[in-house]
């Protein structure tokens, strides 16, 4: 009996070393008295099913990251992103009587903490700025796939061309003086909010760069703003009024995908394919099924205790082949959806503070073996509890991109039917008799 117990300890240590991804406690192992062990640990592989699905429509307003550009690749087709911003007179500046516009200079902050562009960084990217002509009501729900055509004037008021690889922390764009004149007029007759509704940013139609650029709004430093420089009669130098994106001003991330000619053009959610796909910006998600989990429950009168369940999610070689064009997402998340479509966040993957508020949600990163390793112990135990009670799960399990609204990384993943390196669930458990 003592030898068996030692074998249990050694086996458990080896398993945790190989498959550990998050530091979660083993479930069920610590409550079994030493005298009750009658068998060594069993390590087994449980069948998994995985299907690509289009992601849900996502609310895309009031975000810190905004993207603009177009990228085409043979795996995910074409993705086009753009964004809109409402600017307000945060400086409370006023124009002198008879003010005449000298210039309007716009400044946009770029993401400097992580990747600030995706795709081709060595060809010129052309960004255009359009006036928003329809009020973006803060009470309205704007989603990432919102049709924005009716919201902006198709004549640009600004344009800039730049090399993504050479831009550092800020992009400066000179806007047409005519836009400044409209601002001064609206300020004079107090119709600014009704007539100066914001600016819309998108890649120019003649843009030839296969690039998406990511901008970053830091509310503490107001990195998104423009100055209207002007003079009045008798002035010897220009004055200016500052307009910026504040924490209460709306900004909207927009994205649309064209999967024509790719495997994602018509997704099969019934029959498993060799690969499954994760893409942010309302792209795709992965639905998981564990059809044979209930077979783990013994039917011979013995006892069962789950120690660990680790989902191995291998990145395909395709992710390596196209690494210079797009990056595999560094993290993914495992969540659920109830039968009525409500998001379900698994408690074992949360960190909570003293008051029960969520402080952190565990994501799962890429290991040195070029795969994601996901601790599914809590979910598999929950499924076993449901089956033991004679019921069926009332939720589905999904893998999602780590940032579904503003992260452009994408992952091609080997499905469970991939012959070379399949997705698989490795479980470790005790089966013992009293």
Image (spheres, helix red, strand yellow):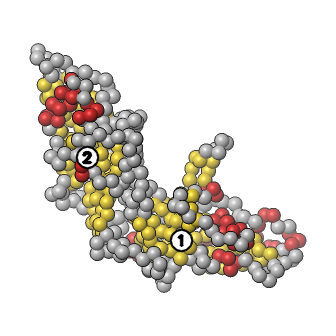
Q: Is residue 187 above or below residue 286?
A: above
Q: Position of residue 300 (x, y in %)?
A: 80, 83
| Secondary structure at numbered mark 1 | strand
Q: Is residue 16 visible?
A: no
The N terminus lies in which quarter of the figure?
Answer: bottom right
Residue located 60% across and 58% down the image: 346
Occupied quadrant, residue 334: bottom right
Q: Position of residue 155 (x, y in %)?
A: 15, 46
Distance from the alpha carbon under mark 1 to that under mark 2: 39 Å
Q: Residue furthest top?
A: 234
Q: Is residue 207 left or right of residue 215?
A: left
Q: Is residue 97 left or right of residue 91?
A: left
Q: Is residue 288 left or right of residue 26?
A: left
Occupied quadrant, residue 356: top right
Residue located 33% across and 73% down the image: 265
Residue located 21% across and 23% down the image: 188
Q: Is residue 187 visible?
A: yes
Q: Position of residue 39 (x, y in %)?
A: 80, 79
Residue located 41% across and 58% down the image: 57
Q: Is residue 22 above or below residue 422?
A: above
Q: Is residue 230 above or below residue 335?
A: above
Q: Position of residue 173 (x, y in %)?
A: 21, 41
Q: Residue furthest front?
A: 340
| Secondary structure at numbered mark 2 | helix
Residue 151 tag number: 2
Nearer to us of marks 1 and 2 is 2
The C terminus lies in which quarter of the figure?
Answer: bottom right
Of residue 60 and residue 424, the one placed in the foreground of this image is 60
How packed is label 1: few (under 14 Cα within 10 Å), some, or many (20 or more)? Answer: some
- Residue that numbered label 1 is attached to: 288
How packed is label 2: few (under 14 Cα within 10 Å), some, or many (20 or more)? Answer: some
Residue 191 tag number: none
């Amino acid at each position: 009996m003592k030898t068996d117990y030692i074998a249990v300890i050694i086996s458990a240590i080896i398993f945790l070393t190989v498959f550990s991804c998050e530091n979660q406690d083993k479930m069920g192992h610590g409550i079994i008295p030493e005298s009750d062990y009658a068998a060594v640990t069993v390590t087994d592989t449980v069948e998994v099913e995985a299907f690509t699905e289009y992601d849900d429509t996502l609310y895309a307003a009031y975000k810190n990251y905004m993207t603009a550009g177009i990228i085409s690749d043979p795996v995910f087709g074409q993705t086009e992103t753009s964004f809109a911003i409402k600017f307000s007179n945060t400086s409370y500046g006023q124009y002198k009587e008879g003010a005449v516009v000298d210039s309007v200079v716009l400044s946009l902050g770029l993401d400097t903490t992580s990747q600030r562009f995706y795709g081709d960084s060595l060809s010129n990217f052309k960004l255009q700025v359009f006036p928003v002509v329809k009020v973006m009501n803060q009470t309205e729900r704007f989603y990432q796939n919102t049709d924005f055509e009716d919201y902006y004037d198709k004549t640009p008021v600004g344009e800039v061309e730049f090399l993504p690889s050479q831009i550092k922390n800020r992009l400066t764009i000179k806007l047409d003086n005519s836009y400044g004149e409209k601002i001064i007029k609206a300020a004079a007759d107090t119709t600014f909010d009704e007539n100066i509704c914001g600016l819309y940013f998108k890649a120019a139609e003649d843009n030839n760069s296969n690039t998406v650029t990511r901008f970053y709004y830091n509310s503490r430093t107001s990195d998104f703003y423009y100055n209207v420089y002007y003079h009045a009669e008798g002035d010897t130098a220009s004055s200016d009024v500052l307009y910026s994106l504040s924490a209460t001003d709306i900004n909207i991330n927009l994205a649309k995908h064209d999967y024509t000619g790719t495997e994602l053009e018509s997704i099969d959610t019934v029959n498993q394919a060799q690969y499954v796909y994760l893409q942010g910006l309302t792209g795709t998600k992965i639905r998981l099924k564990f059809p044979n989990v209930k077979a783990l429950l013994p039917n011979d009168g013995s006892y069962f205790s789950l120690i660990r369940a680790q989902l191995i999610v291998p990145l395909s070689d395709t992710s390596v082949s196209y690494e210079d064009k797009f990056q595999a997402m560094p993290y993914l998340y495992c969540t659920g959806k109830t039968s009525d479509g409500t998001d379900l966040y698994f408690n074992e993957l949360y960190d909570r503070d003293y008051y029960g508020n969520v402080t952190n949600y565990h994501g799962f990163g890429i290991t040195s073996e070029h795969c994601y390793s996901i601790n599914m112990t809590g979910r598999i135990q929950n499924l076993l509890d449901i089956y033991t009670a004679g019921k069926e799960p009332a939720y589905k399990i999904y893998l999602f991109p780590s940032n579904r609204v503003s992260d452009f990384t994408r992952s091609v993943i080997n499905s469970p039917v991939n012959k070379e390196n399949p997705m698989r669930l490795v479980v470790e458990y005790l089966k013992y008799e009293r």
